[in-house]
Amino acid sequence: MPEGLRSPTVFTPKTVSEAVANKYRNPSARFWAGGTYIMSRPNFYPNINQSDIISLAGVQDLSRIYHADRYLEAGAMVTIQQLLTMGSFIFSKELNNAISSIGSSVIRNQATIGGSLCTGDMRFSMSCILATLNAQVELRMVTKSASARWVPVSKLYDRKGNFLFADSALLTRVRIPTDTSSQFQFISRTLDSPMLNPSESVIFGLQYSINQGSIASPNLCITFPDSCFYMSLDFDNLLSTLSFPITQDLTVKVAKRLVADLTLSARQNATPLQIERAARLLEVVLNEINTNYLAG
Amino acid sequence: MRLNCNINGSQYSLVVSSDKPLSQILREHIITFAENSQCLGASCGNCMVLINGNAALSCLVPAFKINGASILTFEGFQKTRFCHDIERAYADIGNQPCPQCYPSKTIIIESILNKVDKENQNRISGFRIGSGGHGEIPQQNDSAANEQAARSRSGTGTISTELIAREMSMSNCQCIEVSDLEKIINLAYRYRSRRRARRS
């Protein structure tokens, strides 16, 4: 061990309450789920400022999956691979493809749902997918009473993509709507690897239905891993005014509006390439929806 | 922290920092560890090991997670008969990864073979165990699944290019074509299935 470096204390709680109590007593300690993000940061080790670790691997409640009629509820420590295995029975093909595109099985076996939502300054595919699907998460607040509350995934981040509950809460469960009777369709695209090339990567998700010849209840989410988490009610309203057939002019007009919105929302370090890619992705997806509708 | 683990069949008891990456532990304590990863966690894919039989990037695994685990590096894996299947497939196809990524690609191939094996066993047994402990979910007993199971029993099944490309995305080195890898993996899988059939 390098001189001056102390080995961080590892807490191994067995229950959620114990984990929250550990965090309450040691505010500088960090929750440790899969560790793929934390350990892939440059200069992770050796680091003189390493804080203590609260390993959540032993908390059984966080590794459960429960499927009800209208939703799937997964503990925060369920790995992406487990979600995929379970999802192959429940989710649509498009959603399964989106989840499997998160990485190879080596990464998916280690990365957890909770961990992928709670990374401090980077947004990966999981947050975009779950926000698009209107998923909700349960947060256990790090207070003496450890009160719990459910919030939509979209409320976990600010517009620049920063995680808002980094030290104040423990994410325990995720509830993903799986109502197969609904007419909602889901489209997701990821350009470039969010982990390896965050400055050029774009993650795009859109859920919508079609009602009386127009797009209804759209829910659009666009993420640049290190600079933007974009969800806008105004823009969703704009999309819901589109009726078929969607002309090329209209598509370009909507894409231009998206570029203007993203330029305002994104951090300074969002690259023009990312903004351009997001606009082109929207154009491609709108054309795809239009073609599918016209083809019947 | 004191760490007890089994590395390549030998028992080790080490005193290390609890958050030290496994790749560094192997590099400093296991002299024969041949991995040549210098990416320090940027997922170059060259530090692949098998932890309790599952492939993992050793640079993403902290010391406190491997207490009591069984770790197999490429050096250890090379001595197993599973590695011989893959090496035989390399020789038969006439192509193999470059020396830089040979260990990691071989271990990724092993993990693909394990994954396909496990899926086929689930299909053969007719149901798949749910991952969350809330009971088991019956699998669709459709004819396609039965056909795939029959193919895997006879060792004539094929592994999709898409799956191979996705799994190989862990290794950045492009020294070998995906089409060749596909042939190698399918051949290795066939050797393994035949041996299993002979034994049973």
Image (cartoon, helix red, strand yellow):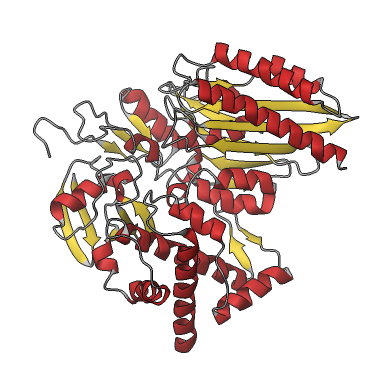
Above or below residue A92? Residue A237 is: above
Name the one closer to the observer, B129 or B187: B187
Residue at 51% of width from left, 46% of height from top? A80
As drawn, B26 above or below A61: below
In the rendered view of the protein, which quadrant contains the N terminus of chain B?
A: top left
Residue A241 vs A38, above or below: the answer is above
Direction top: furthest residue: A264
Residue drawn at the location 28% of the way across and 42% of the way down: B39
In this view, the residue in front, B17 or A13, is B17
Count the labels in the image. 0
Q: Position of residue A146 (x, y in %)?
A: 47, 25
A58 to the left or right of B35: right
Task: Name the quadrant containing residue A72.
Answer: top right
Nearest to the observer: residue A99 or residue A193: A193
Residue A39 drawn at (x, y percent): 32, 38
| Residue in the foreground of this view, choosing between B131 and B181 | B181
Residue at position x 50%, y 43% in the image: A61
Q: Is residue B31 visible?
A: yes
Q: Position of residue A272 (x, y in %)?
A: 51, 20
Residue at the outermost left position? A3
